[in-house]
Amino acid sequence: MGGDVIAEINYLTHTIDGSPPRFLQGSMGLYVKSNFAPSSTRVTIHDLRDKERSLDLDTHGMELLKYDGSVQDEFKEGSEEQRAHYEEISDLLKKHLGASRVIIYHHVFRARGPPRTLEEINENQRNPVFYPHLDVDPAGAHVKMKELLGEEEAERKMGHRFQVINVWRPVGSHTLTDKPLAICDYRSVNPAKDVHQLEIQGPMSITTAYTMSCNDRDAHQWYYLSKMRSDEMFVFKMFDSKSDVAQFAFHTAFINEHEPPSNVDQKSLEMRCLVCYD
């Protein structure tokens, strides 16, 4: 089934210990523990099917693009397929956004069906995430720029516009109906009330990102694309240095109770990209 659905979003309400939100992440992401108090809110998630061109990256923080490239299934780290897909997506984003350079610095496959076990999870193989979040905050975006380009070139590039953008698409021959992706319209978020810094404590470092609360149940406008195919992909923002446009788009997996259980292999690919402009 397609169409708008009512589903649960796991917003932040409070923490179990009263301290700021945090995640404790094990080596290579093998386990994640948080101090979030369990809570969920039922909201409407609007279907973009037949309205695929209604969103704009700088207005809503997200949009849908077509993928007509050669990589249709999972690839191994360091493989020729990975190199080819990185090049395809980089070229597509440069052309579509008018960017001068795109660096894809991470990818992750997320399988649907039974959750992956600890032995099956690694840096590039993970389970879907069921809370609204951004992968990086402004400080993290600047750090990532310096990591990827070096201090001197990063300082030059930061004199111009730059972004951190995610690309998300199903892979494989089956449409994705199990645990689809929902993305929130930037215009419907109140940054002062809804956005909360999230500390991610890893084995070697501490980084910061964002999570989200629900201060007005009917305010947030969530979207998904029903029966999404491997030739369709979401492009959405984590960060934008240009201040008068959409800055970000919170995202989360959700359970679509209106779709029957599936026994076919469904998986998605998410790619994180640094986008620079002259």
Image (cartoon, grey):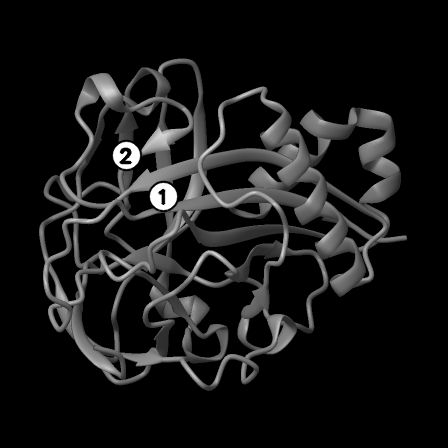
Image disc number at residue 23: 2
Which callout, 1 or 2, points at the residue further toward the start of the chain? 2
Question: Quarter-wise, where is residue 95 in the image?
Answer: bottom right
For the point 26% across and 83% down, the residue is 4
**The residue under label 2 is which amino acid type?**
Phe
Image: 123 above or below 259: above
Question: Quarter-wise, where is residue 125 in the image?
Answer: top left
Image disc number at residue 74: none
Q: Distance between the residues labelled 1 and 2?
A: 7 Å
**The residue under label 1 is which amino acid type?**
Leu
Looking at the image, residue 244 sits to the left or right of residue 267; the answer is right
Badge 1 vs badge 2, beta-carbon distance below 8 Å: yes
For the point 38% across and 65% down, the residue is 228
Q: Which residue is the site of mark 1?
A: 198
Q: Nearer the viewer, residue 228 or 39?
A: 228
Q: Where is residue 48 in the image (x, y as percent from the top left)?
A: 41, 80
